Amino acid sequence: MKQSLIALVLSIVATLVSGAAWLQSKQTVHRAPVKAEEPEQPAYPLENSMARMFRLTWKLGRALDQGNLNLAVFYHHEMDAITEEIVVHGVLHEEKPIGYMTSLMLQPPLAQLEENLERGDLIKSRTSFMKVIESCNTCHTGVGIVHPPITPPPPLEPN
């Protein structure tokens, strides 16, 4: 009887050990989540935005030359949106604070131009437009960007 008791105990122990091993193999191991490295954000496309601003500047100048204030308001709105984007992103270019400089130098003359456009004052709008161009050129010089200055579009030839 002693042998059968030992055999019974060994059988129970073996069953428990194999059950525990089976149970352990089925358990999900919960480890602390590994923080995935965030992918590096692509650089703000400053060159694309500035190229768009240049094109819009010419279009705005043409709209003012033609006395088309509605179209001028549209181009101003597009320029203002790009400017806001540059400021909000805090754009740095070659370690130069382009976003900050834009907020200081371009946003105020754009706001003045907007006021003159909303009042429908074509003469003051043209003056404000020239101040926007001057502001762009001053900023470019101040941060050391070397390129020909932005100029208003040349007058259209009469048909």
Image: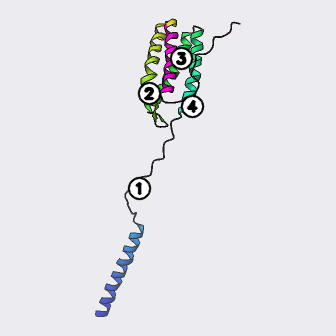
Q: Mark 3 points at which residue?
A: 74
- Report the disc number at residue 158: none
Question: Which residue is located at x 45 percent, y 47 percent?
Answer: 38
Give the crowd class for mark 3: few <14, some 14-19, many >=20 residues within 10 Å. Answer: some
Q: Name the residue under label 4.
A: 48
Mark-to-mark CA distance, 4 and 1: 37 Å
Q: Contact, CB < 8 Å: mark 3 with mark 2?
A: no
- Amino acid type at image mark 3: Phe
Q: Which residue lies furthest to the left in this view?
A: 2
- Amino acid type at image mark 2: Met
- Report the disc number at residue 34: 1
- Report the disc number at residue 101: 2
Q: Which of marks 4 and 1 is nearer the N terminus?
A: 1
Mark-to-mark CA distance, 3 and 2: 24 Å
Q: Earlier in the sequence, mark 4 or mark 3?
A: 4
**Range of residues picked out in magenta:** 124-142
Q: Is the magenta stretch mostly helix, strand or loop?
A: helix
Asked whether 134 falls inside the magenta stretch, the response is yes
Q: Position of residue 8 (x, y in %)?
A: 33, 86
Q: Position of residue 92 (x, y in %)?
A: 46, 35
Give the crowd class for mark 2: few <14, some 14-19, many >=20 residues within 10 Å. Answer: many
Residue 66 higher or lower than 136, as above or below: above
Q: Nearer the viewer, residue 31 or 155?
A: 155
Asked whether 130 falls inside the magenta stretch, the response is yes
Residue 52 higher or lower than 33, as above or below: above
Question: Which residue is located at x 45 percent, y 51 percent?
Answer: 37
| Foreground disc of the pair 4, 2 | 2
